[in-house]
Image (tube, helix red, strand yellow):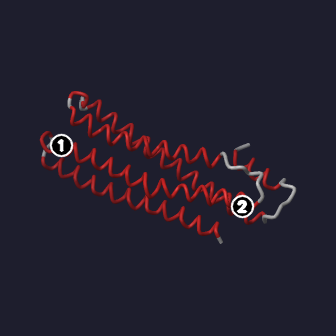
């Protein structure tokens, strides 16, 4: 039995069932959606870390301090973000499903309020660290790559940053909507 089935079973078996099953299922679906998005985020970040480390090894980056600094910043910020998501998933799993509807809802609201710190403090720092690492590498790319490939890296880097920003903004918007819905 998975965690959500246990949660649902515990919820349904409460002695004082003040919540409707529909309301509970809606809260449960919202938590499950966020948990799945956090997992997807970690998978994407993990793949990016593997690609960056592979690139580092492929170009023998350990021979150049500038490459070490740039890639370390990029990989380090991604790993930090992954750890934040793992801690967040763990906190979501530790929520007490035996609480009454009002208390459980309040726990969820607190959880989402804490997620705001991740989104509005740690995420921008992560993106800035990643971009700083990328910018540190640009002079090396320019010196060692053809102008066409260098241009490709610049354009794809900007497009990736825009896509990432839109993805993050959408995730933040979804979680803020979830908070508003829970507060109603």
Which quadrant, please, contains the C terminus? bottom right
Q: Residue at x 48, y 49 (%)?
A: 41
Percent across and percent down for residue 35 are: 58, 51
Residue located beneath label 1 in the image: 141
Q: Determine which quarter of the picture holds residue 58.
A: top left
Residue located beneath label 2 in the image: 25
Residue 149's disc is none
**Separation of marks 1 and 2 at Cα, in angstroms:** 51 Å
**Dot 1: within a 10 Å radius of its alpha carbon, few (fewer than 14), some, or many (20 or more) residues?**
some
Q: Is residue 33 left or right of residue 143?
A: right
**Dot 2: within a 10 Å radius of its alpha carbon, few (fewer than 14), some, or many (20 or more) residues?**
few
Q: Residue at x 53, y 53 (%)?
A: 37
Q: Residue at x 75, y 65 (%)?
A: 22
Percent across and percent down for residue 96 are: 72, 49
Q: Is residue 158 left or right of residue 30?
A: left
Q: Residue at x 38, y 49 (%)?
A: 126
Total numbered labels: 2
SS assignment at label 1: helix
Which quadrant, please, contains the N terminus? top right
Percent across and percent down for residue 173 are: 49, 65
């Amino acid at each position: 039995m998975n965690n959500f089935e246990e949660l649902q079973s515990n919820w349904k078996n409460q002695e004082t069932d003040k919540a409707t099953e529909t309301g509970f299922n809606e809260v449960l679906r919202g938590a499950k959606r966020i948990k799945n998005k956090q997992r997807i985020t970690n998978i994407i970040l993990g793949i990016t870390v593997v690609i960056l480390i592979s690139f580092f090894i492929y170009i023998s980056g350990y021979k150049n301090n500038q490459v070490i600094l740039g890639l370390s910043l990029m990989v380090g910020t991604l790993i930090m973000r992954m750890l934040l998501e793992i801690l967040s998933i763990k906190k979501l799993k530790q929520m007490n499903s035996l609480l009454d509807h009002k208390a459980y809802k309040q726990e969820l609201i607190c959880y989402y309020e804490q997620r705001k710190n991740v989104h509005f403090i740690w995420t921008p720092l992560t993106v800035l660290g990643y971009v700083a690492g990328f910018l540190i590498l640009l002079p090396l790319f320019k010196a060692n790559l053809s102008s066409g490939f260098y241009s490709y890296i610049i354009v794809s880097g900007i497009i990736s940053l825009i896509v990432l920003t839109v993805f993050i903004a959408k995730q933040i918007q979804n979680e803020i909507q979830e908070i508003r819905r829970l507060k109603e």
